[in-house]
Amino acid sequence: MAAGTRPSAGTWPPQRDLLVPFISEGIAMLPVVEVQCPYCGERIELRVENCAEEQRYTEDCPVCCKPMYVVVDLDDDGEPLVTVESEAGS
């Protein structure tokens, strides 16, 4: 494209199908687990990594925005076992 010219209609943003390979190789491949928020009781979905034996981190509930303490362990088949509790540990 010559300097000072505008792209033709439809060239930006990129077409969605151009983004799909990037998405399918990234976060979309992480397992999704359903848990219940220890504060508001809503059932929510978390994407977790299943490549590390044990993970512990804090993530905010997308419903009530309170911090949940998330623990991810892997079973013998490599499937994630996820527990959540309030940051205070209840």
Image: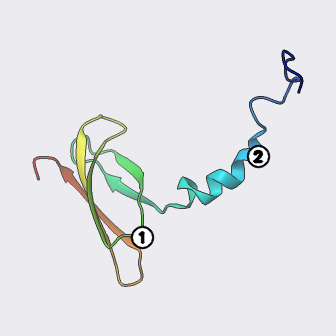
Q: Label 1, on which residue?
A: 51
Q: Position of residue 6 (x, y in %)?
A: 85, 18
With 48 as the anchor, is 3 left or right in this view? right
Residue at 21% from the left image edge and 42% from the top image edge: 39
Residue 7 visible in this rendered orientation of the protein: yes
* Residue 61 vertical position relative to residue 23 in the rendered view, above or below: above
Disc 1/disc 2 C-alpha distance (Å): 27 Å
Q: Label 2, on which residue?
A: 18
Mark number displayed over residue 76: none
The quadrant in which residue 8 appears is: top right
Given the image, on which type of amino acid does mark 1 rest?
Cys
Q: Residues within 10 Å of mark 2 (few under 14, many from 20)?
A: few
Residue at 89% from the left image edge and 23% from the top image edge: 2
With 30 as the anchor, is 71 left or right in this view? left
Given the image, on which type of amino acid does mark 2 rest?
Leu
Q: Position of residue 52 (x, y in %)?
A: 36, 70
Q: Position of residue 18 (x, y in %)?
A: 76, 46
Q: Give the secondary structure at mark 1.
A: loop
Residue lying at the far top in this picture: please name it: 4
Q: Earlier in the sequence, mark 1 or mark 2?
A: 2
Residue lying at the far bottom in this picture: please name it: 76
Q: Position of residue 73 (x, y in %)?
A: 30, 70
In which quadrant is the N terminus drawn? top right
Residue at 37% from the left image edge and 38% from the top image edge: 62
Q: Give the secondary structure at mark 2.
A: helix
Q: Residues within 10 Å of mark 1 (few under 14, many from 20)?
A: few
The quadrant in which residue 42 appears is: top left
Residue at 32% from the left image edge and 41% from the top image edge: 61
The quadrant in which residue 7 appears is: top right
* Residue 37 vertical position relative to residue 8 in the rendered view, above or below: below
Residue sitting nearer the eye, 24 or 61: 24
